[in-house]
Amino acid sequence: MSRLDLGLFIPSTSGSLIIAKGKPPQSVPTWELNKKVAQYADEAGMDFLIAQVKWRGYGGETGHWDSALEAFTLMSGLGAVTKNIKLVASVAVRTLNPAVVAKMAATAHDICGGRFVVNVVAGWNKFEYAQMGLWSDDDYYLNRYEYADEYLTILKRLWTEDHVTFKGEHFEIEDCVSNPKPAKMPEIVCAGQSDAALAFVARQSDYSFIGRLNDTPEQLGETVRKISGMAAEHGREVKSLTLLTVIAAETEEEAMAEKQRYINNRDSVAIEEWQRASGMDRNRADYKELPPEVSTFMSIPHVVGSYQQVAEHLDKLAEQGVSGACLAFPDFAADVPKFCENVMPLMTSR
Ligand SMILES: Cc1cc2nc3c(=O)[nH]c(=O)nc-3n(C[C@H](O)[C@H](O)[C@H](O)COP(=O)(O)O)c2cc1C
């Protein structure tokens, strides 16, 4: 069985991936919390950290995602206080010119000694970008991965070429210069799921995030092979990662009870706003309210069980060719040490 890389979807936004009241899962996304969690994961031998980019949250009593640290700034700071772990910072391509990001990434790459990785976010939430005047019409949404493709072409050329001139549908760059160059090309991650996103991934990305709510490990394996095949057509290799919220305890009963507590304490106002923002507008004829056991966890796959069950689940992902799992927890400060001490030693894929 090949090794499963482990990473954290670090708590850079209020509430992480559970929309529920109470403390935890509500964490205030401070530098101190993220530093503590990042340093613990680094020392424990985890492989990567991802910080998402968020410009607008969902309100409610929890203020879910209302507060979000900026990913490049945060990861640059973490680069200076960690040793080995890779740092994946998300960029919303609509918000920053690629020449600006080329230099930001080169700087961050230098700070952390070549551990910096860029997660390309094409953007799906109109409200985040419309508030900045960056979503003039819905054409952007339809063409977002073409836009991202030109963006990445420019970014990679600026990282490797002295003078870049580029004329595309979305960008015109004239004799553009970006120094210093990163010591080696930063790796690229993309978490898009649509067909356009997968075509983009095959051409431009090194890692793809895969996995829908109820996918079995076998279904994930099929997706891994599909994406590898698409990348191979371009003579490239793309590895697959998956995002997973973990609720683990000594016994399955304890873990199930914890999950139920979050469902019982869900923040219905924030959930409704999240669903609306995700395009599931209540006024639309096809609107379907998601069941609480889905919406409380933002439709993100989650594994709930004893330490042994969680370890076995992760091993099954590795058996299917998934390269890594990015984990989120209800209470990162307490749960990351628990996971590293109790689950990691039980995994055969580590
Ligand atoms: C691990 C992971 C990280 C993501 N990070 C962000 C992010 O930082 N900001 C964001 O707006 N969307 C983020 N997304 C959403 C994706 O970028 C993507 O838009 C979404 O999966 C829908 O796919 P599509 O754009 O192909 O429709 C993330 C998704 C995953 C699974």
Image (cartoon, helix red, strand yellow):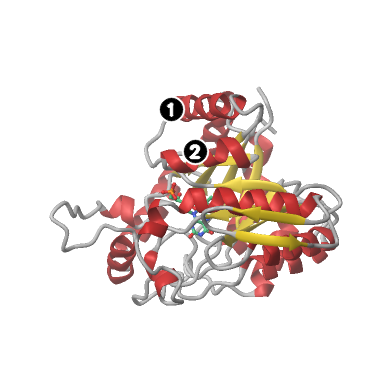
Question: At x 50% / y 55%, what residue is drawn?
Answer: 122
For the residues labelled 1 and 2, the Cα–Cα distance comes to 16 Å
**Could you tell me which quadrant the C terminus lies in?**
top right
Left or right, residue 239 beside residue 284: right
Residue 279, image quadrant: bottom left
Relative to 73, residue 246 above or below: above
**Could you tell me which quadrant the N terminus lies in?**
top right
Residue type at the position of mark 2? Leu
Question: At x 46% / y 77%, what residue is drawn?
Answer: 132
Residue type at the position of mark 1? Gln
Q: Is mark 2 within 8 Å of ligand 1?
A: yes
Point out which mark residue 198 bears.
2
Is residue 43 visible to us here?
no
Q: Is mark 1 within 8 Å of ligand 1?
A: no
Total numbered labels placed on residues in the image: 2
Whole-percent x, y for residue 308 in the image: 55, 36
Relative to 235, residue 58 above or below: below
In this rendered view, identify the residue nearer to me: 143 or 78. 143
The crowding category of the residue bearing disc 2, from other C-alpha atoms within 10 Å (few below 14, some 14 to 19, many at least 20), is: many
Whole-percent x, y for residue 337 in the image: 66, 55
In this rendered view, identify the residue nearer to me: 200 or 306. 200
Residue underneath mark 1: 219
Whole-percent x, y for residue 149 in the image: 56, 48
